[in-house]
Amino acid sequence: MSQRERHADNSRVNQNKLDRLGMLRRLASLKGSSPRRPAIARALFIAGLAIAHSFASASAVSTAVYEKPFNRYNLMNVKLYLHNSINDWDEFECAIELGHRESSWRFDAVNKSSGAYGLFQHMSKHAYKWNVFTQIDKHNEYINRRYDGSWCKAVQHLKGKGWH
């Protein structure tokens, strides 16, 4: 048996050990196809939600005492709301990047030099009154007006100009 054949057998054995739910086989069937990347991203996102939910439910009792009063939003719920309001995976990935770049996902972040406030650093003088879901709705309106509904165009503008 050649080294290449032994390596192929070893990887098949290792893959079968790891692949209890058949996820790797399904992804392998997409190899070389255009839906492979979004399928992997969705699988990772769903796995992340499941892990976050399991940790949140396991530690809900012990962390409730130490929660800060302003930390009343579950980040996964906020991101799920954002995904449902965009309803496009590629645009959602750009929105995630934008939220991370602008505020590191803190809904009460304030830019001291410009006065911008919130997840996506709104310049409205009323932004500090908005809850996190209103911030998402308002920024969705802004993206629709300024960038024709494309969060990815907003990210490109942010990378090029330093603001969006």
Image: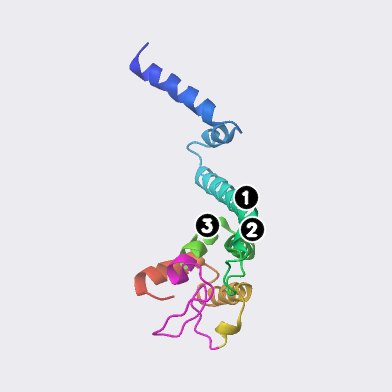
User: Label 1: which residue?
Assistant: 54
25 relative to 9 in the view: left or right: right
Q: CA distance from mark 1 to mark 3?
A: 26 Å
Q: Residue, x 61% and y 58% (percent of image)?
A: 62
In the foreground, 15 or 73: 73
Left or right: 58 as drawn, with respect to 97: right
| Residue 153 image position (x, y, % from top left) | 46, 67
- Mark before the other along the chain sequence, 1 or 3: 1
Label 1 crowding class (10 Å Cα cut-off): few <14, some 14-19, many 20+?
Answer: few
Q: Earlier in the sequence, mark 2 or mark 3?
A: 2
The answer to whether the residue labelled 1 contacts the one labelled 3, judged by CB atoms less than 8 Å apart, is no
Identify the element where label 1 is drawn.
helix
In the picture of the structure, the residue carrying the numbered disc 2 is 60
Query: Does residue 36 appear to the left or right of 84 in the view shown?
Result: left
- Looking at the image, is mark 2 or mark 3 nearer the viewer? 2
The image shows residue 84 at horizontal and vertical percentages of 64, 62
| Magenta-drawn stretch contains 121 | yes
SS for tag 2?
A: helix
**What stretch of residues is rendered in magenta?**
99-125
Q: Position of residue 126 (x, y in %)?
A: 57, 87
> Amino acid under label 1?
Ser
Q: Which residue is mark 3?
A: 90
